[in-house]
Amino acid sequence: MKETATVVIPNYNGGQFLEKCLDSLARQSYRAFRVLVIDNGSEDNSREILERYREGDFPVPLEVDYLGENTGFSGAVNRGIRESGTPYVILLNNDVECDEFYVAELVRAIAHSPRIFSVSPKMIQMAHPELIDDAGDMYSVMGWAYQRGVGQSIRRYRKGSMIFSACAGAAIYRRSVFREIGDFDEMHFAYLEDIDVGYRAKIYGYDNLYCPSAKVFHVGSGTSGSKYNPFKVRLAARNNVYLNWKNMPLPQLIFNLPAIALGTAVKSVFFARRGFGRDYVSGLLEGIRTAGRARRVPYRPEHLKNYLLIEGELIYGALLYCWEFFRRKVHDGLQ
């Protein structure tokens, strides 16, 4: 059977998750895929586990590429994409367990049109399987990236739809498009790199979709260890600067600057109240200081329509975030 997809799993000290992740791939109804694990210099028992699976009776081809150092999420997945050789690449976090139809549904969805760059599944919280973890990623004019549907009932978001970007924790990508838009930006190291690559795809006229029939269960923050920590807050703040600087032409950046400034001010207060104020400011300053090294998307007149559509999505993303925030507050008040 000719393989149509490669499942790339970036792994860094994820031995506690690997067995369940690989076992869920072994149970897939669709078998025309291979698995490639990119190990980012793990120091736990990951190698022992991976070698046992690689030498065992795994139902699909399984390969492991051991790197000598931690190249970050972006570096690992770029290595996997280059080595894949299949039309589609599925990026899968090591702390994810897949429904048996997960690969089949993602392949079916992305094959629907050559203009589809990525497809994001319904990600469900492992600890609370009645709640959504991610129904596709969104981005807003205020510079806020967020998970659509997070914390809401899995009975919601039952229809496929366009999204701003797929969550690279469990999404499928059309490999040929990377040659046109560029790969994951390794300056990001980790965090917001999937929003960035989805943003670039939209500039070039490609679509990112949400497919609710493809399902995974996600532990969340399996590698970094928590929802908020100094490392994550600093990198996300820095990468947020890169994201806007790289993808917005100067007129659009100037137009959105008041909203971005407001969003930054709100976030600085949010993180200061949680003890991460210095980390957030440090990340912002690092982003501003080093943004000149980031590769900007060159403006092309033929992309003007796409920029206008994206601006509409950024405004919609802000309105949706505010609506969902208000809805959660009302719901919590009624409990």
Image: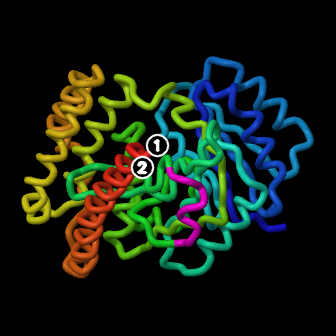
Q: Secondary structure at mark 1?
A: loop
264 lies left or right of 115? left
Query: Which span is picked out in magenta?
Result: 152-160
For mark 2, does the 10 Å Cα neighbourhood hold few (<14), some (14 to 19), or many (20 or more) residues? few
Magenta stretch contains residue 155: yes
| Predominant secondary structure, magenta span | loop
Q: Residue at x 28, y 66 (%)?
A: 316
Q: Which mark is residue 331?
A: 2
312 lies left or right of 256? right
The front one of 98 and 61 is: 98
Determine which residue is flagged by label 1. 335
**Image quarter (top left, top right, bottom left or bottom right) of the N terminus:** bottom right
Magenta stretch contains residue 313: no
Where residue 318 appears, as percent x and y from the top left, is 26, 59
Q: Residue at x 29, y 68 (%)?
A: 313
122 lies left or right of 142? right
Please say if the residues under marks 1 and 2 sit with CB atoms less than 8 Å apart: yes
The front one of 125 and 56 is: 125
What kind of residue is marked 1? Gln
215 lies left or right of 174? right
Q: Residue 164 falls in which quadrant of the image?
A: bottom left
Q: Residue furthest front?
A: 334
When the figure is inspected, residue 309 is found, relative to residue 94, above or below; the finding is below
Where residue 74 appears, as percent x and y from the top left, is 46, 43
